[in-house]
Image (spheres, rainbow, N blue to C red):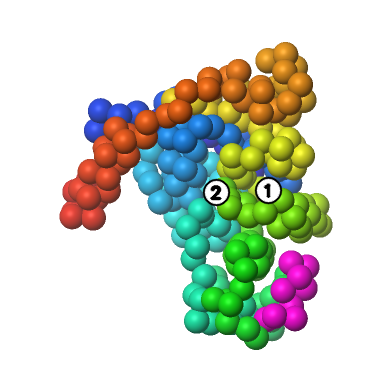
Amino acid sequence: MIQVRNLVKTFGTFTAVNDVSFDVAEGEIFAFLGPNGAGKTTTIKMLTTLLRPTSGAIELDGLDPQTKQNEARKRFGIVFQDPSLDGELSAAENMEIHGVLYHVPRKLRRQRSEELLKLFELWDRRAEQVKKFSGGMKRRLEIARGFLHTPKILFLDEPTLGLDPQSRNQLWTHVKKVNEAERVTVFLTTHYMDEADRVAHRIGVIDHGKLVAQGTPKAIKEQTGKESLEEAFLALTGSTIRDESAGSADQMRQFARMWSGGRR
């Protein structure tokens, strides 16, 4: 469902993603792990047409997202770290707008919205303004909305950041139900090693822009000789706190050039 070959992304002199290759199968939950600044979000932005690779190849369900952007975008849903809901609208209205934007027929989007809001335990609050929701409820709504247009792939960039353990557990229970029922491929990033260990079928670990390990959680623990995925992750990436300032500055300069009419 996802094929990445020799993917590279540079920002000036900084290489954010360096010769990364991996595959994700249909219906698989794939966790893409790495320290801050390792290249996770940059990779997701390239996969989802928001950034153009410097070199390398990407296929999403057989499509090149660089040459067939619109067709590729119809195949996936995405939930970024930053909130994207309209707090002044109700849960049902947020779902409705998403369905309209993706050209989901009216009858189908109403049916689909009801099914997903019930699954994510938000149906009884569907008429309430989203700004009154808790953080966990908002996250569940964003993910329910991401499933609305029946995507083949759902990208989740740190979807449980800041949530309490109960909310995290509940959210992943719902995601796994849709994954199993609809064979949706889920590509996620997270800093919670316990949930990656519990939820993901396979894992890729990126560090300093390079993919340093991939396999099942069990295989990665065996490869490093560690009992927990967190210990294995630290063995692969080290325990030093990362300074993102250099890479972030180069990225900001590149985005400024893009928006001012520079190279796209």
Q: Residue at x 54, y 32 (%)?
A: 34
Residue 93 visible, this angle:
no
Q: Secondary structure at mark 2?
A: strand
Q: Amino acid at mark 2?
A: Asp
| Image x and y of residue 171, in percent | 72, 57
Residue 56, above or below 48: above
Q: Is disc 1 placed on a helix, strand or loop? A: strand
What's the amino acid at mark 1?
Thr
Range covered by the magenta-colored residues:
118-126
Residue 250 position, x and y percent, is 26, 37
Disc 2 to disc 1: CB gap under 8 Å: no
Asked if the stretch drawn in magenta spans residue 158, the answer is: no
Per the image, the residue denoted by label 2 is: 157
Give left or right: position of 112 versus 104.
right
**Residue at (27% x, 39% y) in the render:** 249
Characterize the local packing of mark 2: few (<14), some (14-19) or many (20 or more) Cα atoms within 10 angstroms. Answer: many
Find residue 28 and report its image quarter: top right
In percent of width and height, residue 55 lies at 37, 32
Q: Check the image and report above or below for 256 versus 227.
A: below
* Location of mark 1 (residue): 185
| Residue 88 visible in image | yes
**On the picture, is 240 further left or further right than 93?**
left
Q: Which mark is residue 112?
A: none
Quarter the N terminus occupies: top right
| Residue 253 position (above or below residue 10) | below
Determine the residue positioned at 66% across, 28% down.
Answer: 230
Front of the two marks 2 and 1: 2
Q: Earlier in the sequence, mark 2 or mark 1?
A: 2
- Give the Cα separation between the discs numbered 2 and 1: 14 Å
Quarter of the image for residue 247 reads top left
In the image, 74 versus 48, the foreground residue is 48
